[in-house]
Image (tube, helix red, strand yellow):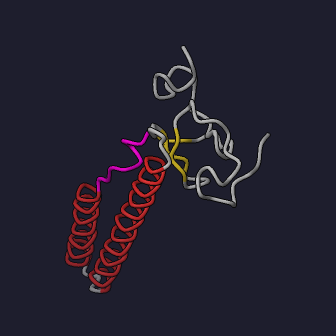
Amino acid sequence: MANGVDNGTANGPVACPLCGAAGTAAVAEATETSGCMHFAEGTVLALMAGAAGKYYADDRDWPWLTAVGAVVAVLLLVGTIAVVRGENRDARRARSAVDRAAAAGTVATHYCAACGEASSPETPRADGPATGRTDLPHGP
């Protein structure tokens, strides 16, 4: 079976034909986000941290634990928002790369985060102008 025909599962990850990076992702994986799920998880964790702070403050009669729980909850929410925004940004970059590949006449099956381009395993190594990018490495 040719490398990439099975989306890289049987022969390991598919190498990017444009830059040679080993870790490419299938276009479907790279362009979808699970931001709602991550936000729900982060919110639940933040609520649990706040509730734990309040519970242990009352249980042990240490009122400062309420403030600690609140600070941890805020930090968890800020971290959650950063993760969701980063994931959305990465998905937008992948969709943009797929659109560029389609405009160049390539049916993209994999997205390379290293060079920011989408390609198929059959794509020949680009010399830069073929993808509209001049910052990619030239040949092996």
Magenta-highlighted residues: 26-34
Q: Nearer the viewer, residue 12 or 92?
A: 92
Q: Nearer the viewer, residue 105 or 37?
A: 105
Q: How many marks?
A: 0
Q: Residue furthest right?
A: 140
> In the rendered structure, does residue 15 fall within the stretch colored magenta?
no
Q: Position of residue 122 (x, y in %)?
A: 57, 30
Name the residue at 33% across, 71% down: 81
Image: 62 above or below 126: below
Image: 67 above or below 132: below
* Among the 4 quarters of the image, the one containing residue 79: bottom left
Q: Which quarter shows the N terminus?
A: top right
Name the residue at 52% across, 41% down: 119
Image: 61 above or below 89: below
Name the residue at 49% across, 25% down: 9
> In the rendered structure, does residue 32 fall within the stretch colored magenta?
yes
Q: Residue furthest top?
A: 1
Left or right, 133 with respect to 107, comes to right
Q: Nearer the viewer, residue 104 or 39?
A: 104
Q: Position of residue 12 (x, y in %)?
A: 57, 27
Q: Position of residue 137 (x, y in %)?
A: 74, 51
Image: 72 above or below 99: below
Q: Position of residue 125 (x, y in %)?
A: 68, 40
Q: Which quarter shows the C terminus?
A: top right
